[in-house]
Image (tube, helix red, strand yellow):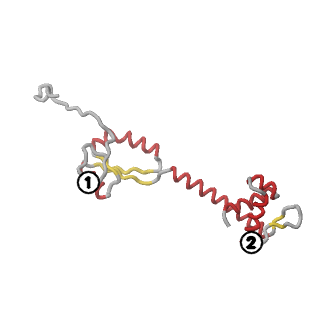
Amino acid sequence: MNLRDLEAFKTVVECGSFSKASEELYIAQPSLSKTIQKLEKMLGYTLIDRTNRILRLTDEGKLLYEKSLVILQEMKDLELELGESRNQIKGHLKIGLPQIIGTFFFPKVAKQFKSKFPDVTLEIVEDGGLEVTKLVEKGELDVAFVVLPTKSNEIEESLIYEGHFVACLPENHRLKRCQ
């Protein structure tokens, strides 16, 4: 027995005839009849009383119809839930940040991330760039954002932002003229 067999049976019952059900299911009436006969043979019960033109369910047919409604609805619900979870990322992300990034750069990133992935919790660990890099290597952090490139073969790095740094010097400093 498979879900298509149950769907075919349910449609026959709800349509009240094999011909209407075959039209609704877009299958030939003889194929639909064979599907129901196969279902009856597999279960070992007659499900539909065929003694007259009016479609009547046997007691076993009524039970199968009621159970089919529940099973088919459960499958639809499951497909919806799986579809939602496929598109919805959930979990916990542990992030390492040097203080300068945590203060100036990361709040905007975190806000955008949370709006896109509301079911992901963020845990921030602030420490120096070298220290958060080591924590990623040990597996204690999922990701770290650092200012300088890492010197590790154990982790993968990717440039995500490039900006200019400005040196602030006193008016009479000897490096003022160096550019």
**Numbered disc 2: secondary structure:** helix
Give the foreground label among 1 and 2: 2
Residue identifier under label 1:
153
Residue identifier under label 2:
41
Residue at coordinates 12% horizontally, 29% vertically from top-left? Answer: 175
Residue at coordinates 84% horizontally, 62% vertically from top-left? Answer: 55
The answer to which quarter of the image holds residue 16 is: bottom right
Residue at coordinates 73% horizontally, 60% vertically from top-left? Answer: 8
The amino acid on which the numbered mark 2 sits, given as a three-letter code, is: Lys
Which percent across, then down, holds residue 155?
30, 53
In the image as oriented, which residue stretches furthest toward the left?
174
Q: Is residue 169 above or below residue 144?
A: above
Residue at coordinates 26% horizontally, 43% vertically from top-left? Answer: 147
In the image as oriented, which residue stretches furthest toward the bottom?
44
Q: Earlier in the sequence, mark 1 or mark 2?
A: 2
Q: Is residue 160 above or below residue 11?
A: above
Structural crowding at the residue carrying mark 2, measured as other residues with C-alpha within 10 Å and reported as few (<14), some (14–19) or many (≥20):
few
Q: Is residue 145 above or below residue 139?
A: above
Judge by depth and name the residue closer to the eye, 152 or 124. 152
Which percent across, then down, holds residue 83?
56, 52
Judge by depth and name the residue closer to the eye, 1 or 163. 1
- Measured Cα–Cα span from mark 1 to mark 2: 64 Å
Q: Can you say which quadrant of the picture contains the N terminus? A: bottom right
User: What mark, if any, has residue 43 been given in the picture?
Assistant: none
Which percent across, then down, holds residue 103?
31, 41
**Numbered disc 1: secondary structure:** loop
